[in-house]
Amino acid sequence: MGEGKIDKSLLSGSTTLLLLQLLSEKDMYGYQMIEELKKRSDDTFHLKAGSLYPLLHGLEEKGCVCAYEQDAVAGKPRRYYHLTEQGHRTLQEKEESWNQYARAVNQVLKGGASCVAG
């Protein structure tokens, strides 16, 4: 792995969490989410439309997001996604799980929570 490269398997588990976080801030359309993830992650997250839309459709089926169309300044209407109450609850659950996971990984990397130098 070269410098600045992150294993794709590490990213896959966090993508839904990241999308929910973006949508908790404001309604967005697909390309806008892709660009915002790239920008906020310092170009680490390069989500493709072919990965994004199945995730969004899955979130829609679970009642986490709802979609609506809105006219764009130029061109055809854009499909925006809005985070529902269920989506807010799911975001909170996923964030708690992520934080617990990150703490556990960090404890292992640092030698364990209860390791005492003897």
Image (spheres, grey):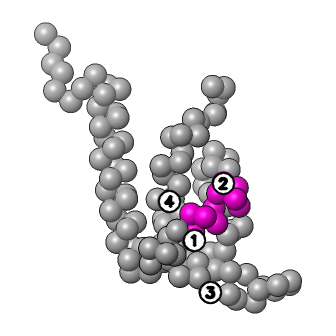
Q: Residue at x 63, y 25 (%)?
A: 1
Q: Which residues are magenta?
A: 47-57
**8 or 108: nearer the eye?**
8
> Residues under labels 3 and 1: Cα distance?
13 Å
Residue 73 visible (yes or no): yes
| Label 3 secondary element | strand
Q: Is the Cβ of the residue at disc 4 closer than 8 Å to that at disc 3?
A: no
Q: Which mark identifies residue 68?
A: 3
Q: Quick one: label 3 or label 1, which is nearer the N terminus?
A: 1
Which of the two discs, 2 and 1, labels the residue nearer the N terminus? 2
Q: Residue 3 versus residue 8: which sits nearer the camera?
A: 8
Q: In terms of sequence position, does the residue under pointer 4 or pointer 2 come before the other?
A: 4
State whether residue 98 is above or below residue 94: above
Give the residue pinned by disc 4. Answer: 16
For the residues labelled 2 and 3, the Cα–Cα distance comes to: 22 Å
Residue 5 location in percent, x, y? 63, 34
